[in-house]
Image: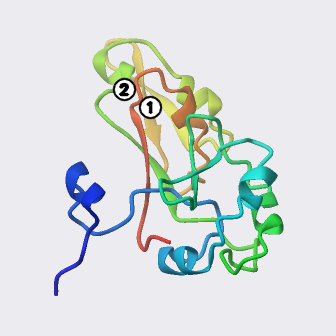
């Protein structure tokens, strides 16, 4: 069975057929979001962190370069369409961080900004031989909030969905 992809996905080399946008927390599956979203931007206006923006087709997406998600659920409350799950007591998403080889400590340069910003303590610094500390990520406690992404000076943090994507 083949999966269709858009021209933009083809040009970007995304042959998986999956979207590459991070949607707001508590968003329903991508197909439901695209089918039900009116593109009114109420969720974007409601976001106190100003991290919500639109993708090229006008649907809401997260821009972690602007800041982190505090999971306030203002986007969910503001939305009049059937785009979000009704229960904000559930996990907001299956988004987690990963640390790439661009990380300064992995290159022998002192840094630890990601660990300092991580409110859930999902990132800690581990001392290794040579007297430098390197980041250790605990996937179990990572909320996917994006605080580490914004603060990383080398863009070594990647955020992606684990398991089934919305």
Q: Badge 2: few (under 14), some or many (20 or more) residues near its Cα, within 10 Å?
A: many
- Reply above or below: 152 against 74: above
Residue 49 x/y as whole percent:
75, 42
For the point 39% across and 15% down, the residue is 132
Q: Quadrant of the N terminus?
A: bottom left
Q: Which mark is residue 135?
A: 1
- Reply above or below: 147 against 52: above
* The image quarter in which residue 35 lies: bottom right
Q: Badge 1: few (under 14), some or many (20 or more) residues near its Cα, within 10 Å?
A: many
* The image quarter in which residue 65 lies: top right
Residue 17 x/y as whole percent:
28, 69
Q: Which of 17/39 is in front?
A: 39
The secondary element bearing badge 2 is classed as: loop
Residue 155 x/y as whole percent:
41, 29
Q: Which of 116/159 is in front?
A: 159
Q: Which residue is mark 2?
A: 103
């Amino acid at each position: 069975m083949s999966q269709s992809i858009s021209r933009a996905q083809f040009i970007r080399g995304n042959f998986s057929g999956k979207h590459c946008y991070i949607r707001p927390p508590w968003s329903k599956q991508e197909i439901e979001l695209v089918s039900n979203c009116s593109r009114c931007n109420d969720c974007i206006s409601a976001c106190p962190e100003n991290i919500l923006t639109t993708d090229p087709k006008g649907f809401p997406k997260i821009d972690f370069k602007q800041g982190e998600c505090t999971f306030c659920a203002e986007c969910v409350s503001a939305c009049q369409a059937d785009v979000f799950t009704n229960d904000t007591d559930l996990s907001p998403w299956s988004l987690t961080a990963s640390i790439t080889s661009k990380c300064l400590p992995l290159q022998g340069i002192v840094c630890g900004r990601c660990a300092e910003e991580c409110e859930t303590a999902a990132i800690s610094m581990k001392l290794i031989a040579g007297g430098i500390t390197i980041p250790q990520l605990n996937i179990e406690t990572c909320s996917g909030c994006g605080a580490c992404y914004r603060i990383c000076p080398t863009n070594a943090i990647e955020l992606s969905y684990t398991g089934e994507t919305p």
